[in-house]
Image (cartoon, rainbow, N blue to C red):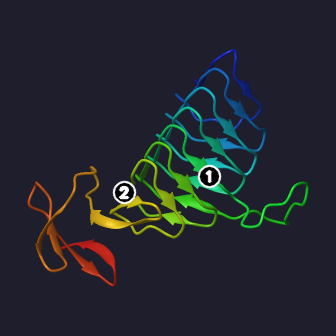
Amino acid sequence: MSGIHPLADVRTTKIGANTNIWQFAVVLAGAQIGSSCNINCHTFIENDVIIGNHVTVKSGVYLWDGIVAEDHTFIGPNVTFTNDKYPRSQQHLGAFQKTILKTGCSVGAGATILGGVTIGSFAIIGAGTIVTKDVPAFALFYGTPGRVRGWVNEKGAKLAEISKGQFADEAGNVWFLHNNLLVRK
């Protein structure tokens, strides 16, 4: 059973079990939210939004049409998303840009995510980063604009470079770069 705070305005019926939606959240009728999610207070979720299972959306986040947050993603406080490359008042496109947060990625507080990008699985976006392009899986990505500054494993631990293009985590797993993608050996 979902826990919806009485001061939340939730219009969708597509909410999985054990999901909590806190006060002053607004969720429109077409939104889909998976199970065991935590939607914090002062959030807004539009109609064409899909949220997977075990997702955390912190306070001050607005998820606009076209955003998909896959399983186990984390969206930090006050992350800003866009979905229209050329916005004009009261002029609407036929379709909004799609933004995809792949499984297990984390977006730090105050980051800005431009529409139409994909953030790869298990990538970490640093606080305050401006994301203007796709982010590879397992990337440690930060700056203004953001760029790859290192690599992480599934747990978010930074990988140590052991030789050119070869990395290891604290458990001794070895990773290497292949066509600018990180692959476990």
* Amino acid beneath label 1: Phe
* Residue 60 percent coordinates (x, y): 59, 35
Q: Is residue 183 above or below residue 4?
A: below
User: Residue at point 76% right, 44% down?
Assistant: 30
From the viewer's perspective, is the residue at label 2 or at label 1 nearer? 1
Q: Is residue 98 above or below residue 45?
A: below
- Label 1 secondary element: strand
* Residue 112 percent coordinates (x, y): 55, 53
Where residue 43 sits, quadrant-wise, is top right
Which residue in the rendered view is the most extreme toward the top? Answer: 6
Q: Is residue 102 above or below residue 15?
A: below
Residue 46 lies left or right of residue 78; in this view the side is right
Check if mark 2's residue and mark 1's residue have beta carbons within 8 Å. Answer: no
Q: Earlier in the sequence, mark 2 or mark 1?
A: 1
* Residue 154 percent coordinates (x, y): 29, 55
Label 2: which residue? 122
Where residue 28 sits, quadrant-wise, is top right
Give the quadrant of the N terminus. top right
Label 1: which residue? 81
